[in-house]
Amino acid sequence: MSQPVLVLVEHADGAVRPVTGELLTLAAQLGSPAAVVVGNPGTAELLAGELGRLGAGTVYAAESDEATGYLITPAVAALQAAAQVAEPAAILVASTVDGREISGRLAVRLNSGVISDAVGVSRAEDGTVVAEQSVFGGDYTVHARVTLGTPIISVRTNSVEAHAEAAQAAVQAVDVTVDPAASATVVAEHPEPVGDRPELGSASVVVSGGRGVGSAENFTVVEDLADVFGGAVGASRAAVDSGYYPHQFQVGQTGTSVSPQLYIALGVSGAIQHRAGMQTSKTIVAINKDADAPIFELADIGVVGDLFDVAPKVAEAVRSSKG
C-alpha cells in the first residue's frame, strides 16, 4: 500500500468545500489520500461518505467540544496528531489565509519544510515530493521540494479539477490536545453577508471590475455579467481602494487568489499585484479601452473597447445561447 498523504478538510454547514476534493485529487498523485477532519463530535462520520467519494480511504477524526472554540491551533494539533499516526509522504492544505498560517505553525511543530501557494504536485524520479508554483505574476513556473521532514504544502484553489477515484472511507479517531494558553479563543462570530453568488475563492467563473468601472454604481455591469455566467464578482485593489466594491472581494496578492476556469477582467489595468492573484486562471478575457493595458499581456482573449458597451453585449449573447 502506498504511503498516506494527509489533507486538511475544509468544511462548513455539514458539507465539504470544493477545494477539499481538489486536494484529495492531488494527494492521489502522491500516495493514498487521507482526510483530517477537525470539528465537534460526529462531524467526521457526517462527512465520511462524501470524503470517500472524493477519494479518501481514511478519515482521521480530530473531534472535541473545543475544536471550534479556538483559532488555527486545533487544526495544527490535528494534523500533528494524524502525522504521528500515519507517517505521511506529504501534508496538503488549502492556500487560504488560515491555511498558510496552519502550514507555518505545523512546520515548526514537525521540524519540516513548507511550500506555499502551489498549483500542482508530483513525484520526482527519486520518489521525493515536488511542488509546482507559478511566480512573478505567472511569468515563471518553478518546482520546489522540501529537504527537511515531511513536505507541508498549501495549494491554490481551482488548481486542479477534482476527479480522484472513490474509496470506502474508514474513520479513525486521533487524540488532539490544544493548549488554551497558546491559543486565541473565539468569543463571537460575525460572518460576512453572503448572497446567491458562488464564493470568490472557489468559483469556476469570476468577473472582476477595476478602476475603469468608474464608480460603485457602475459596478452593476460587473455583477450583471457575473450573474449571467453564474459566477462570482471580484474587484481590483484600485477599485476597492476607490470605494467601488467591498474589500472582501479584492482579487490579488493582498486579497483573494483565484484560479477559475474563466476570468473576465472589466476595466482592470493588470498591475502586478492583481495579476499575482489570478494569473493561473484557465481562460482570461480582458475588456479595456486602453490597448496598452498590461492585462492584455496575460489575456487569452483581449477586447479593446468600452466595457459599458462590450460587457452588456456579451451578457446578452450568453443569455441568447441559453435560450
Image (spheres, rainbow, N blue to C red):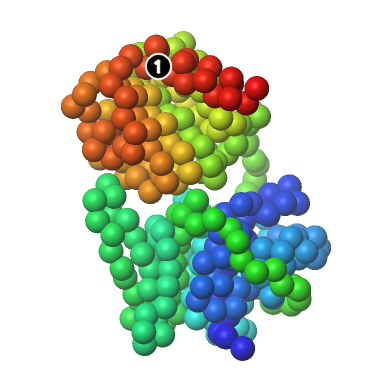
Using the rendered view, name the quadrant where residue 174 is placed: bottom right
x, y percent for residue 208: 43, 29
Element type where label 1 sits in the image = helix
Question: Mark 1 packing: few (<14 Cα in 10 Å), some, or many (20+)?
Answer: some
In this picture, residue 160 sits left or right of residue 133: right
Residue 225: x and y in percent read 51, 23
Q: Which residue is outermost to the left?
A: 292
Residue 306 in the image, given as x and y percentages of width and height: 33, 14
Quadrant location, the C terminus: top right
Residue at 54 percent across and 45 percent down: it is 202
- Which residue does the image show at 26% across and 33% down from the upper left? 296
Indicate whether 210 appears above or below 308.
below
Depicted 226 relative to depicted 316: above or below: below
Residue at x 64%, y 40% (from the top left corner): 189
Vertical arrangement, residue 154 with respect to residue 1, above or below:
above
Judge left or right: residue 299 versus residue 157. Answer: left
* Quarter of the N terminus within the rendering: bottom right
Q: Is residue 194 shown to the viewer in this render?
A: yes
* In the foreground, 270 or 84: 270
Amino acid at dot 1:
Val
Does 257 sit left or right of 61 as displayed? left
The answer to whether any part of residue 77 appears in the image is: no
Residue 79: quadrant of the picture: bottom right
Location of residue 230 in the rendering, given as x and y in whole percent from the top left corner = 59, 31
- Work out whether residue 215 or residue 65 is closer to the camera in this orientation and state it: 215
The residue beneath circle 1 is: 310
Using residue 141 as the reference point, say whether residue 155 is left or right of it: right
Give the residue drawn at x 24%, y 51%: 139
